[in-house]
Image (cartoon, rainbow, N blue to C red):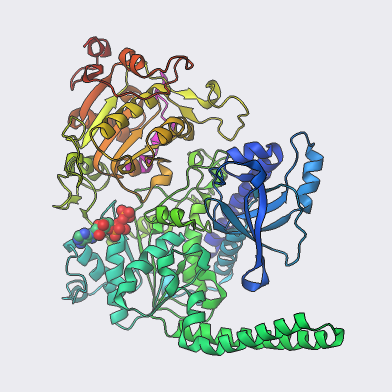
Amino acid sequence: MKATDISSFATSQLSLLNNELQAELAETQLLTSTHAPTVLQRAGLALLNLSVSSQRTGLGGKTLLELGLDPAVGGDGELPEHGLRVGDICAVAEQPKGAERKKERESKEKQGAEGVLTRVQREAVTVALDKEEIDIPGGKLWLVKLANDVTYKRLNLTMTKLQKMQPSEHSLLTQVLFGQSSPTPMSEDDLKADLKWSDPSLNESQKDAIRFALASRDIALIHGPPGTGKTHTLIELILQLVSQGQRLLVCGPSNISVDNIVERLSSHKVPMVRLGHPARLLPGVLNHSLEVLTKTSEAAAIVSDIRSEMDAKQASIRKTRNGREKKGIYGEIKELRKEFRQREGRVVSELLRTSKVVLSTLHGAGSFHLKNEKFDAVIVDEASQALEAQCWIPIIMAGGVGKLVLAGDHLQLPPTIKSLNAKPAKPAQEPRTKKKEEKAKIGVLDMVDDAEKLSLGDKRQSRPSKNSKEDGTTLETTLFDRLLNLHGPAIKRMLTTQYRMHEKIMAFPSTALYEDKLIAAEAVKSRLLRDLPYEVTDTEDTREPVVFWDTQGGDFPEKTEDDTDSGAKGKSSLLAESKVNENEAAIVRMHVQSLVTAGVKAEDIAIVTPYNGQLALLSGTLKERFPGIELGSIDGFQGREKEAVIVSLVRSNPEHEVGFLAEKRRLNVAMTRPKRHLCVIGDSETVSRGSKFLKAWMGFLEEMADLRYPDLAQLQEQVIDEGSPPGKFVRCAPLQDAAVVKGRAGKNLDHANAG
Ligand SMILES: Nc1ncnc2c1ncn2[C@@H]1O[C@H](COP(=O)(O)OP(=O)(O)OP(=O)(O)O)[C@@H](O)[C@H]1O
C-alpha cells in the first residue's frame, strides 16, 4: 500500500478536470462555429425549424418555453432524432437563413436566449430560460446545445475543498481512502453474523457481500459482474443498515441509477427522500422527491397557506389601476415571498431530518439542502461509472461520513473522458440503461449531470493525452479502481451468480475476466431463443447460444468513413475517422432476418458495434425494416440486456489494427449483454492479433461457438438491391442455408466458400 498525499492528489485532479472542461468548451465552440446548423442538427446537437408552442412561468420564476416543429414545416410534428437531453444547456435563437453569412448568424445567436432543457418529448422540448424577461423573435427558431460547465464547477469546488483541508481535518475514512491508514480489521463474528434477511432469495455471494459491507468500519467494495444482482444486493444492504439505526446517503452517477434504487426501495416503507429536479425523475419515484413531498406532506400545509395568499395578492394586482396601490401590493408580496421561502426551508429541513435514506446523484449530493446533514454511510451504485472527483462530492459535501460502500464492476467501461481526444465525434445513440426506455417513452430523458454527460461514442479511444499526470493520476482511474490497487482484493467481495446469460455466453468472460468464478443461475443457464415464451421455431440459430460469423480472408474489408459515399456529402469531422464494414453489415441484416423469420421479435434483438460509422450504416435500413429493433454503440449499451445480441466488430485490415477493440472492458460489455443468443461477426485474423485477450476470445469462439463462414458471392447475390451502389447492401433478404458454410476447423476460406 502506497500512501498518497491528499493535497497533491486534489491538485492534479483539479488540473485534469480543467483540461476536461477546456476540451468540452473547445469542442462545443468548434462544433458550433465551424458547422452549419443543418450539420449540427444531423449530429444531434441542434434542432431546426422550431416555434414556441407555449410559454409559462416555472419553478423559481423562470420562463419555460415549449418548442415544437413550426407548423409551416409540415410532417407529423415529431422532432428529428437528436441527442439533446434534460439538463443540457442550450441557446434558442432566430434561425439563420440558408445563405446568411457567419457574421449575421453570430449576431442573431447573440440576441438569442440561453437556458436549460427541462423536458424532452417526441414532439417538443422545453427550455427554462436563464433570464426572467426576454423577447423571443417571431420567426423560425433553432436550438443548439452549448458547453455545460455546471458539472465541472461542482467537481472543482469539491476538489478545492479537499486540496485545502488541513491534515487534522481528514477523517479516518479519508485517510483510508488515501492509504494513510489501513482499513479497520473486521470482526470474524460480524463476517459470519446470522442476519434476518428481508429477501430470503439472496444467494450466498450476495449475503456474504452484505455481511462484509455491514462489518466494515470504513470501506467496502461490492464487485458485481454483469447480471449478478448488484442493485438487488444494495437494497438488502440499505434495509439492514437502516434496521441498525443508521442514516444513509445513497448515490449513483446518473439519475436512472438512483431512480432504480428508489423504485426498488419504495415497497419497503423506509422513510426516504429523493433529491433532484422532478423533470429528471421517473414518474414512479416522484412521490419520494423532495419537491413533491414539500407540497404534499403534512408539514407542507403551512407553505400552501401562504402560497394561496400570494396568489390572491397577484390577482388583486391585475385588478388595480392605481400605481401607488400596486406598489403597496408588490411590497406585501415581497414580504410574503420571504416568509414563504423561510417556511419552505423549514419544511425541507424537517423532511430531510426524518428521512433515514436520502438519495441523489453524486452531483446532486452537493446540493445546499445537504449542507448541514450528517450520514453514517454513503453508498454509491455504479461506482465504476463515476469519476473519482464525483465520488468525493457526497463524501466531502455531506459531512464527516464514517463508511463508504462502492458497488460496481471495474471490468466494464469507466466513464468517458473527453480530454482524451482532440477531435470531436458524432454523439452516440442515447445511452440507455435499464429504465431508460421507459423514460424515453414518457418523454423524460435522463439528466446529463455527470459521467453520462461525458459519454460520446467513438471518443473513448486510448491515446496518450493531457488526461494523465506525471504521477500516474488519470481522470479515468475511478475511485473503485484506485482503492483496489491501494488496498488489494481484501476490501472487496464479488457477487458470483449471474441471472442473465446462458452458461455458454457467460463462459468466456468468466474465464478471461472473473477468475472463472461466475455461475449461471439455474433459471437462465440453458435458456435458448427457441424457449422464449412466445412461438419461436427451432432453427440452427434459435437453438444456438453463441454463433460466430468469421469473415477472415479479406473479403470483408473495413473502410474509414471518409472513403465511403455514405457520409461524403455534407459530411463533417463529426463522423470522420469512424469505421464501417459494409459486407459485415450485410451479414448483420441476414442474421436479423433469419432470427425474425424464426419468430424472434425484433424488440428482443439488439445490434451493438464500437463504431458510430457502422451504427449509422446499419440504422439506415434495419430500423425501417424491423421496427422495434435496437441499435447502439457498445458503450451506450452498458447496463442493458436483450434476448439476442449481435455484435459487429467492423475491424478487418491487413495491418491487423483493432482500434477500439483493444479495450477489453468494451468487449466485455458487448459479450455480456445477451440472455439467450450472442452472435459475433468479425474477422478473426485481424482481431486475434490485437491483444492476448482478443486472441483468447477468437480461440474460444472458434472452438466453442457455432462457427460459420459467410459466402460473399452468394451473400451479394441475395442482398444487393438492383441499382444500388456497388458494395452497398440495402435490401435484406433471408439467406438460404446453402449460402452459409459452416465449419469448425477450416481456416481456408476458398475451400469453405467452394461449399
Ligand atoms: N438472489 C437472486 N435470486 C433471483 N434473482 C436475482 C437475485 N439477485 C438478482 N436477481 C435478478 O437478477 C437480475 C439483475 O439484478 P440487478 O438489476 O440487481 O443486477 P445488477 O448487477 O445491478 O445489474 P447490472 O448487471 O445491469 O449491473 C434482476 O432481474 C434480479 O431480479
Q: Regarding ligand 1, which quadrant of the image does it lie in?
A: bottom left
The residue positioned 28% from the left and 26% from the top of the image is: 549
**Which region is colored magenta?**
652-668
Question: Between residues 535 and 149, which one lies in front from this camera angle?
Answer: 535
The residue positioned 64% from the left and 47% from the top of the image is: 71
- Is residue 370 shown in magenta? no
Q: Percent x, y for residue 643?
A: 27, 44
Q: Is residue 287 left or right of residue 514?
A: right
**Where is the C terminus found, in terms of image quarters?**
top left
Q: Percent x, y for residue 10?
A: 54, 61
Kindly indicate the quadrant of the structure image that contains residue 152. bottom right
Kindly indicate the quadrant of the structure image that contains residue 29. top right
Q: With respect to residue 261, does 583 lie above or below?
A: above
Question: Between residues 560 and 212, which one lies in front from this camera angle?
Answer: 560
Q: Percent x, y for residue 728?
A: 45, 20
For the image, the number of numbered tags is 0
Question: Between residues 148 and 346, which one lies in front from this camera angle?
Answer: 346
The residue positioned 75% from the left and 66% from the top of the image is: 133
Q: Is residue 552 left or right of residue 96?
A: left
Whether residue 359 is visible here, answered yes or no, is: no
Question: Between residues 518 and 256, which one lies in front from this camera angle?
Answer: 256
Q: With respect to residue 483, does 518 lie above or below?
A: above
Whether residue 136 is visible here, answered yes or no, is: yes
Q: With respect to residue 650, does 375 lie above or below?
A: below
Q: Percent x, y for residue 312?
A: 67, 85
- Is residue 656 shown in magenta? yes
**Where is the N terminus found, in terms of image quarters?**
bottom left
Farthest right residue? 323
Q: With respect to residue 512, does 128 lie above or below?
A: below
